[in-house]
Image (spheres, grey):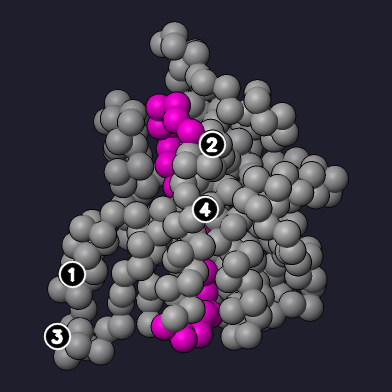
Amino acid sequence: HVIMACRNEEKAQAAIQDIRTQVDTKDSDNLKLDFIQLDLASYESVRKFVDQFHQRHLPLHLLINNGGIYMSPFALTNNGQESHFGVNHLGHFLLTNLLLDDLKQNVPSRIVMLASRAHLRHPGIEFDDERRNQPYPDNGIATYRARAAAYSQSKLANMMFCKELAERLGPDSRIYCNGVHPGVVKTNVFQHINWIKFVLSPFMRTVENGAMTTLYVATHPDIEIKNIHGAYFVPSKHIPPPYIRPVEANPNPVVLDKSARERLWELSKRLTGLSNTI
């Protein structure tokens, strides 16, 4: 049973219908695929989603944190946070913590954090609220750089959260939490900078190929057999499409900084209003 947690119901239902048409007719009636609305820019929406999920009394074996925005114009979330940090990190931080007990009750289970190689370019988290939420410059290239930095920071936060959660769960945990860089994929994530999609299009992965890294970390037996926790996976450059077997890679050194991770965790707790976490 798959729950599609999406902000836009119309797009979600269209995706569900598209998936159904691609499944063999004899299996389509047995395909359990449902929509529950989730807006990661709103803590209220995240909590409402979790409540609605619990009302269905379904087991949770896999959580894929795939929502996000990329290079968006400056905006604040419903809770007053810069949108990239708020949507890409804080929304997932709250969602994951609220669903952690469900994952514990259904081990072996997995958490897949969609990161990006962009996290490698960021020097560290801006912990000062005022500076982190400062509007981007309105000046061409400076605006572009500010958007890129905001996105990179949010992806760094994703990997720091992933690593810290894995360590808090412990090496013997049967919840396997890992991060992935899917590659540069042809999706509508580039809606705010179409020129990049135009320039890079010949080098981009298809949606199917882009999903391979996520699917590997979400489903491959190696993750449990090798007891992999808190790792960062990227598509291999050495095996051509259609199948791209992922490989482990080194994350940004900041991800390995325990004190920085703990500081981000406490900041995230404060901003999301969580009193008790693992």
**Mark number for residue 43?**
4
Q: Amino acid at mark 3?
A: Thr
Is label 2 or label 3 in front? 2
Q: Quadrant of residue 117?
A: top right
Q: Quadrant of residue 35?
A: bottom left
Q: Amino acid at mark 4?
A: Tyr
Residue receiving disc 1:
17
Residue receiving disc 3:
25
Task: Determine whether the residue tagged by mark 2 lies in a helix, strand or loop.
Answer: loop
Q: From which residue to which does the magenta span run?
A: 56-76
Q: Is residue 92 magenta?
A: no
Quadrant placement of the C terminus:
bottom right
Asked whether residue 209 appears in the rendered view, the answer is: no
Q: Quadrant of residue 12?
A: bottom left
Q: Sort mark 4 into few (<14), some (14-19) or many (20+) by Cα contacts within 10 Å.
A: many
**Mark number for residue 80?**
2
Relative image position of residue 211 (x, y in whole percent): 40, 60
Which sits earlier in the primary sequence, circle 4 or circle 2? Answer: 4
Quadrant placement of the N terminus:
bottom left
Which sits earlier in the primary sequence, circle 4 or circle 1? Answer: 1
Residue farthest to the top, as pictured: 139
Relative image position of residue 49 (x, y in whole percent): 44, 66
Could you tell me if the residues under marks 2 and 3 are in contact, i.e. CB atoms within 8 Å? no
Residue at horizontal 45 percent and vertical 26 percent from the top: 74
Residue at horizontal 42 percent and vertical 42 percent from the top: 69
